[in-house]
Image: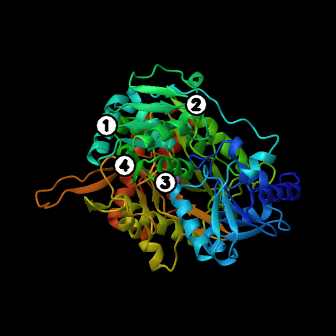
Amino acid sequence: MRVEANFSKRLAQVRRRMDKAGVNAFLVPSADAFQGEYVPASDRRLTWISGFTGSMGNLLITKRQACLFVDGRYTLQAGKEADPALFTIIPSALQSPAEWVERHLKPGQTLGIDPWLITDNGARTLEEACRKAQASLKLLDGNPIDQIWTDRPAPPVLPVWPHALDYAGESGSAKRGRVAAKLRDKGTDALLITAPESLCWLLNIRGADVPHAPLVRAFALLHRDASVDLFLEPERLKLALDQSVRLIAPDHLIGRLQELGSHHQAIWIDPKQTPLILSEGLKFAGAKITNADDPILLMRACKNPVEIAGARSAHRRDGLALVRFLSGLRAGGRESDAAKAVDAERAKEPLSQGPSFDTIAAFGANGAIVHYRAKPKQDAKLKPGGLFLLDSGGQYLDGTTDVTRTVFIGPGRPTAEMKQRFTLVLKGHIALATAIFPKGTSGGQLDILARQFLWRAGLDYDHGTGHGVGSFLSVHEGPQRISKAGGQAVLEEGMILSIEPGYYKANAYGIRIESLALVVPAPKTKADERDMLAFEILTMVPIDRRLIAPGLLTKSERYWLNAYQQRVRSALRGKLNGAARGWLERATVPL
Ligand SMILES: [Mn+2]
């Protein structure tokens, strides 16, 4: 549905501002300065100027055109939300904004960017595109949209609270000591921290600046002596900071960077994440820059024993909520009611802090739309004979969950095709869940395990097989991934990843089986010559046995399935009663 606003007037106003600033084109990304998946209302510039509400996109405004670049999951949605008379939708797989700039900007023209919103790496790519077009890149002093957005919501100034040691498992000072040692090894004086997940992990703090993840949008500097400059409004802090953490008002960030630069300090930045204004500011002031991956990324990806125990416990509670929901699921209800009901079941569990993303409750053909969101009144009704795909997750103080189950809505029976496709997806899920692999293996190398059975049947799915998950942080966190593209990070003990193969039949149904898995040492055998790793499945929700074609499973696959269902049953049975307990018992009967 189109948001009622005068987008044509807004575009005209931006174009006047562009004229004033002396630029021919202006790039509006969906991201804010923190480059996260979720952005507060105060920073949703792309939505305000175009109406497009998806989580990722870029708008390139010129005198005559406004091109909205979105990825495959958002092309349909962008076409509905952004007025086609004003905006041209361009699938980003076909052309990126930089490719567009290279092809369409004329010699002598200028592309304007807001250097807070574009990363150091992003700016390099755009600069190169401009160079090829004999055009130039201009860093704007002030964002043209902010200048005309009169009813812009205030940025969040919300409390920041401590993440207790009982959940974090390692003190902030121990973490700072470990990271500072890395700085010294690299010969750098300070690390500029611009990823909210890294900041929250390092200082054992949490906040509520964005929906679905307990993040604090703030910048910080970690020095080689393990002290920290934290740029945050003091009134937000609901905890006593360690003496080695200096609280500095956010306005002083640039000044502080200039000071470090003037002392020619060596500063470590992650160019994939750092706003251009900060990296340029440092360079301009005389700092020596070391470009490398954020060292905190890998440290927070490898969970410690306390976080692992928390994850196991959070997943048991999450399983209880899901089983209560699934036991009451019937034909006749609507998708959006189902989404509300599952969120409500999670909210009843101890330590619950809300959903880890917007629940995807998709019936029938809607299940084939990978990032479907049910909207009240426009959503489908669950009918007998169809498939219902539920992808949801929870934030708990002791862990973050993400689970997808596809269930048959009775009465009646699934078609032979549904069962065949479901079983092929399940076989891939099992093949990956039972994989044993040597240390040094990357996620990308394992991706094929989940697809092999679909490929043999001439089928596939167009999304990654697995993503990393934080510990009461973001539900999508790197560096670990299982995917055809970008799965280069090596899998290490303590990492948590999703295993989520699927199959989607357009206009018919969608299937996805997703559990979270912990990377653990593989059981040792005497013959082992190498250290091997394996997965432990954390998710505790039965897999719908009515959708399985048993003849397609091998003996060992059937053994795995029965053992998994049995594990779920023993973990949850004692904490359920009445209908939910009866449902769990029936759902976990061996195949
Ligand atoms: Mn997932």
For disc 4, the marked residue is 298
Q: Is residue 171 left or right of residue 156?
A: left
For disc 1, the marked residue is 305
Q: Residues within 10 Å of mark 3 (few under 14, many from 20)?
A: many
Q: Does the Cβ of the disc 1 residue fall within 8 Å of ligand 1?
A: no
Instruction: Look at the numbered disc 4 and give the secondary structure of its residue.
Output: helix
Q: Residues within 10 Å of mark 1 (few under 14, many from 20)?
A: few
Alpha-carbon distance for marks 4 and 3? 32 Å
Identify the mark nearer the N-term, 2 or 1.
Answer: 1
Alpha-carbon distance for marks 2 and 1? 26 Å
Identify residue type, mark 2. Lys
In front: 581, or 186? 186
The answer to whether residue 149 of the structure is visible from this angle is yes
Alpha-carbon distance for marks 3 and 2? 23 Å
The answer to whether residue 214 of the structure is visible from this angle is no
Identify residue type, mark 3. Ile
Identify residue type, mark 1. Pro
Q: Is residue 380 above or below residue 583?
A: below
Q: Which mark is residue 348?
A: 2
How is the protein colored in the picture?
A: rainbow
Q: Which mark is residue 543?
A: 3
Instruction: Look at the numbered disc 1 and give the secondary structure of its residue.
Output: helix
